[in-house]
Amino acid sequence: MKILLIIDAQNYFVGKETLPVFKRIAEHIKESGKDYDFLAFTRHVNNKEAPLYKIIGFDELMGGKETEIWDGLKEFAKNVFVKDTYSIFRLKEFVEFLEKNKITKVYIAGFNLSACINTAMIDGLDCGFETFLLKNLVGDHYGKDKTIQESIKTNIGEDHVL
């Protein structure tokens, strides 16, 4: 079985550079959604107990409109998993959903390529799932040409790159 996983397609990530990606994701679901056995979305909702807040002081995505699924995708968002960390595979409920439904292949689209998507690709593989990046259906509101070191500085903190 296979799933199309849309990571963090939230209002927070909508911008001039990323809006075309949101639209491509919606079009892909309309045209090819039936090719997947399941469709799921994630929402990143930060909180004061999350490592992103406690360790690096990231105080955005704490709730409200910015954490909601973009309006152009809401109609498809029936299975939504809320996380407070980079990787959806750290959420026990999500992994159990995949296992219960015998899903072995995870096709990934959404945001941010340099953080949550990158982490999910690797963690998914580590958890025993075959992960696929839909390269035309991912975006990054930090910009296109980010190096791995720059991504680590942004995602974990500049003081963690020595």
Image: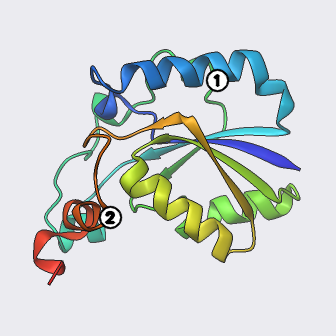
Q: Earlier in the sequence, mark 2 or mark 1?
A: 1
Is residue 83 visible to us here?
no
**Which residue is tagged 2?**
148
The image quarter in which residue 151 lies: bottom left
Cα distance between the residues tagged 2 and 1 = 32 Å
Does residue 20 sit above or below 149 in this rendering? above
Q: Dot 2 surroundings within 10 Å: few (below 14), some, or many (20 or more)?
A: few
Q: How many marks?
A: 2
Q: Amino acid at mark 2?
A: Ile
Which quadrant does the C terminus fall into? bottom left
Find residue 140 and report its horizontal and vertical position in percent.
35, 41
User: Measured from the top left, where is residue 1 in percent x and y?
Assistant: 89, 50
Q: Is residue 120 left or right of residue 98?
A: left
Q: Residue at the spot x=66%, y=40% of the render?
A: 40
Badge 1 marks a residue whose secondary structure is helix
- Residue depicted at 61% across the width and 29% down the height: 77
* Amino acid at dot 1: Phe
For mark 1, what is the residue?
76
Please, which colouring scheme is shown? rainbow
Q: Looking at this view, name the residue that lies furthest to the bottom.
A: 162
Q: What is the secondary structure assignment of the residue under circle 2? A: helix
Q: Write the residue at 79% across / 39% down.
A: 38
